[in-house]
């Protein structure tokens, strides 16, 4: 089964990897961004 990946997300993850970020750091950033967004939008 093939899954289509969003090319923009792939590029962002690759860039984060090139910058030396770990997957855990990326997850933490995305989680914090989601929490901030939820606080703003209620």
Image (tube, rainbow, N blue to C red):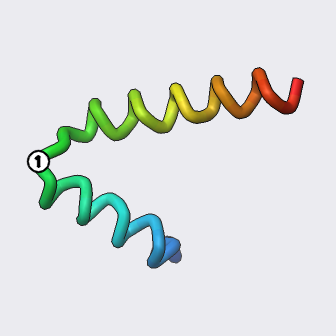
> Dividing the picture into quarters, in which one does residue 21 lie?
top left
Decide: is 38 above or below 2: above
Residue for point 13% across, 60% down: 18
Tell how many labels: 1
20 above or below 3?
A: above
- Residue 27 place in picture, x, y as percent: 39, 35
Is 16 above or below relative to 35?
below
User: Which residue corresponds to the image point at 49% horizontal and 37% vertical from the top-left?
Assistant: 30
Q: Which residue is drawn at 62% across and 33% down?
A: 34
Left or right position of 12 against 19: right
Crowdedness of circle 1 by 10 Å Cα count: few (<14), some, many (20+)? few
Rendering quarter of residue 9: bottom left
**Residue that extends furthest to the front in the rendered view of this protein:** 40
- Residue 29: image location, x then y, percent: 42, 34
Which residue sits at x=36%, y=63%?
12
Q: In this view, does 18 lie to the left or right of 38?
A: left
Q: Which residue carries the number 1 mark?
A: 20
Judging from the image, what secondary structure is the residue with disc 1 in? loop
Please provide percent x and percent y for residue 13: 32, 59
* The C terminus - image quarter: top right
Image: 37 above or below 1 = above
């Amino acid at each position: 089964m093939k899954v289509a990946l969003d090319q923009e997300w792939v590029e962002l993850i690759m860039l984060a990897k090139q910058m030396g970020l770990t997957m855990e750091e990326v997850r933490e950033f995305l989680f914090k961004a989601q929490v901030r967004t939820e606080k703003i939008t209620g």
